[in-house]
Image (cartoon, rainbow, N blue to C red):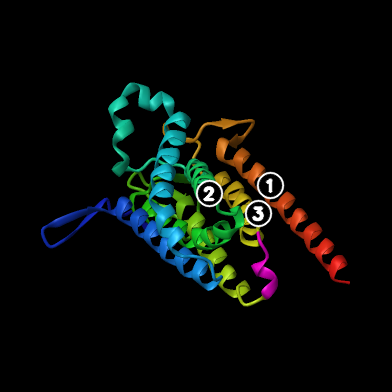
Amino acid sequence: MIPYFQITEFSIGPVSFQAWGTMVALGLLAGIFIAYQETKRRKRDPNRILDLSFWIILSSFLGARIFYVIGNLDLYLKNPISIFKIWEGGMTIFGGLVGALIAYLIFLKKKKIYFWDLADPIVFALPFGIFLGRIGCFLIHDHIGKITTVPWGIQYLDGTIRHETTLYNGLSALVLFIIFLVLRRFPWSQKKGFYVASFMIWYGISRFITDFFRAEDLPISDHRWLGLTINQYVSILLFLGGICLFKKLLIRQKQTNEQEN
């Protein structure tokens, strides 16, 4: 088994950094850089990514924190000041995605930009950003898993061996990013909406599965309704939305082929 360890902060000279916050920040910076390069490769104005990034970061943080607080309202009602201690962790990826989407839609309307011009490049970069952020969650053990006997489990100080669900989510995101890099060589992967639909399907399935490995026996365990977490219900919607989007893409491609013939 892997011995328990926790890295909450580290120092470079006299300066100390929060491990979780640093990894999330690196994930955001990496995501912006990759999205910038992908937008440039598609011969779109990459500076729009820079203009948009501030608002997406702000809205995603707000959305992620708000969704997390709502999901753990009983804990935060006891200590409301903890709501503002974001450096201690406590955010939800789906809340962040909702917040980012709201900022994106407002930005598009204000700048009069076509939705798909930036959506696919941003989502292309998203898995790698998630991967780095999940490393931060892993370092502080933000989401503890169920008791297990697998050899890659983490042996906690109380002697229990548990799954590390944040590591599973991070590795899944990394695999998806590698797949995206491979698929980028093929012209058909550049169709509008391809990466968005692919991400929705992959992440929907991945998160639905990994939440089954989250702890249920701890005071901080996720609430479950009919045996599923709220994130699993959102995962189902995300997956179905990705399937519907892919269906629309196929219909659009079929109509284009018929017109060309």
Q: Which residue is mark 2?
A: 108
Q: Position of residue 245 (x, y in %)?
A: 71, 52
Q: Position of residue 219 (x, y in %)?
A: 42, 31
Of the image marks 1 and 3, the number of the one nearer the N terminus: 3
What secondary structure is the magenta-colored segment mainly? helix
Q: Position of residue 16 (x, y in %)?
A: 18, 54
Instruction: Name the element at disc 3.
Output: helix
Instruction: Name the element at disc 2.
Output: helix
Of the image marks 2 and 3, the number of the one nearer the N terminus: 2
Mark 1 in CB contact with mark 2 (< 8 angstroms): no
Residue type at mark 1: give it.
Gly
Q: Is residue 19 magenta?
A: no
Q: Which residue is mark 1?
A: 241
Q: Which residue is mark 3?
A: 201
242 vs 161, nearest the viewer: 242
Q: Residue furthest left?
A: 14
Pointer 3: residues within 10 angstroms few (<14), some, or many (20+)?
A: many
Assign the N terminus to one quadrant of the image.
bottom left
169 vs 177, nearest the viewer: 177
Q: Which residues are magenta?
A: 187-192
